[in-house]
Image (spheres, rainbow, N blue to C red):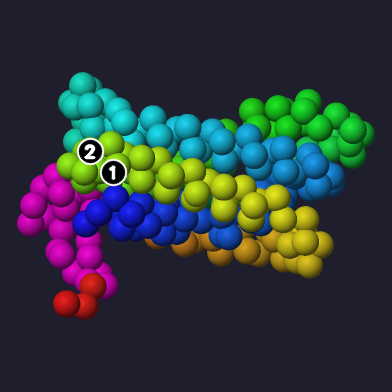
């Protein structure tokens, strides 16, 4: 595999794991009432943070886990637990209300101030672990091992792939105004609850996969890999 193939594979994987399409209703609720410029500024800050965070793990992830003596299995289990709590919050209660910003209209001309305040509010739990969850971090760390074998070209291709996935996500988030107008509050609330259920199932899958790696033979392969790729 060359650097281009490695980068393309990482881009496709990260775009699926960052899931900007699935996270659109939450971002729309978090920026309800914001102007287009405000929404673009918030999405740019979040996606810039995601790019820097994932790039950090690309270069230091393996060494960081080794330094603290943390296995990928343990990382998957811990990340799965965090995602499970987040999924439960999404599936029950008024999850979107926690992201509401009543001051969006009152400071419509204060683009930087609004973007900074919203970014601080959305770093957790939106950027982490909803967007940048254990799957995205694990994918970057695993990719780092393959990129290291290709030298500078492999690492450069990986950085470009991370940047491209974050730019596409930023564009998706910047266009959420259309979605919020079409779906309305009720439609977004329904989608978020369904996504919460899916996120809970994904979290359980991460935990089972981590347990299967930590304790071989404990979890059936049909559970950890329910839909094996066709040979």
Is residue 74 in sight in this rendering?
A: no
Is 217 colored magenta in this rendering?
yes
Name the spot of residue 179 as percent of width and height, x first: 73, 62
Q: Which residue is mark 2?
A: 151
Residue drawn at x 42%, y 48% is 161
In terms of image quadrants, where is residue 229? bottom left
In terms of image quadrants, where is residue 20? bottom right
Q: Which residue is mark 1?
A: 154
Is 3 colored magenta in this rendering?
no
Q: Quadrant of the N terminus?
A: bottom left
Q: Nearer the viewer, residue 197 or 15?
A: 15
Q: Nearer the viewer, residue 203 or 56?
A: 56
Query: Is 115 on the left-hand or right-hand side of 215?
Result: right
Residue drawn at x 56%, y 59% is 22
Residue drawn at x 35%, y 33% is 57
Residue farthest toward the bottom in the current orientation of the protein: 230
Name the spot of residue 197 as percent of width and height, x first: 49, 61
Is residue 53 in sight in this rendering?
A: yes
Query: Which label was assigned to residue 75?
Result: none
* Magenta span: 206-228
Residue farthest toward the front in the current orientation of the protein: 153
Do the CB atoms of the residues marked 1 and 2 lie less than 8 Å apart? yes
């Amino acid at each position: 595999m060359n650097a281009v193939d490695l980068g393309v594979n990482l881009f496709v994987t990260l775009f699926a794991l960052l899931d900007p399409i699935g996270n659109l209703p939450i971002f729309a609720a978090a920026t309800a009432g914001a102007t287009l410029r405000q929404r673009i500024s918030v999405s740019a800050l979040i996606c810039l943070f995601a790019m820097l965070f994932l790039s950090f793990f690309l270069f230091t992830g393996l060494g960081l886990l080794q330094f603290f003596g943390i296995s990928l299995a343990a990382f998957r289990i811990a990340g799965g637990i965090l995602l499970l709590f987040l999924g439960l919050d999404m599936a029950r209660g008024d999850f979107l209300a926690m992201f509401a910003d009543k001051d969006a209209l009152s400071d419509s001309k204060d683009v930087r101030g609004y973007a900074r305040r919203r970014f601080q509010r959305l770093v957790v739990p939106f950027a982490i672990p909803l967007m940048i969850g254990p799957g995205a971090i694990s994918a970057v760390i695993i990719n780092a091992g393959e990129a290291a074998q290709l030298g500078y070209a492999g690492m450069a291709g990986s950085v470009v792939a991370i940047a491209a996935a974050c730019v596409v996500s930023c564009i998706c988030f910047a266009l959420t105004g259309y979605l919020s107008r079409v779906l309305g509050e009720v439609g977004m609330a329904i989608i978020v609850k369904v996504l919460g259920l899916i996120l809970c199932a994904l979290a359980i899958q991460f935990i089972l996969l981590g347990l299967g790696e930590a304790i071989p033979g404990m979890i059936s392969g049909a559970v950890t890999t329910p839909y094996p790729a066709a040979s």
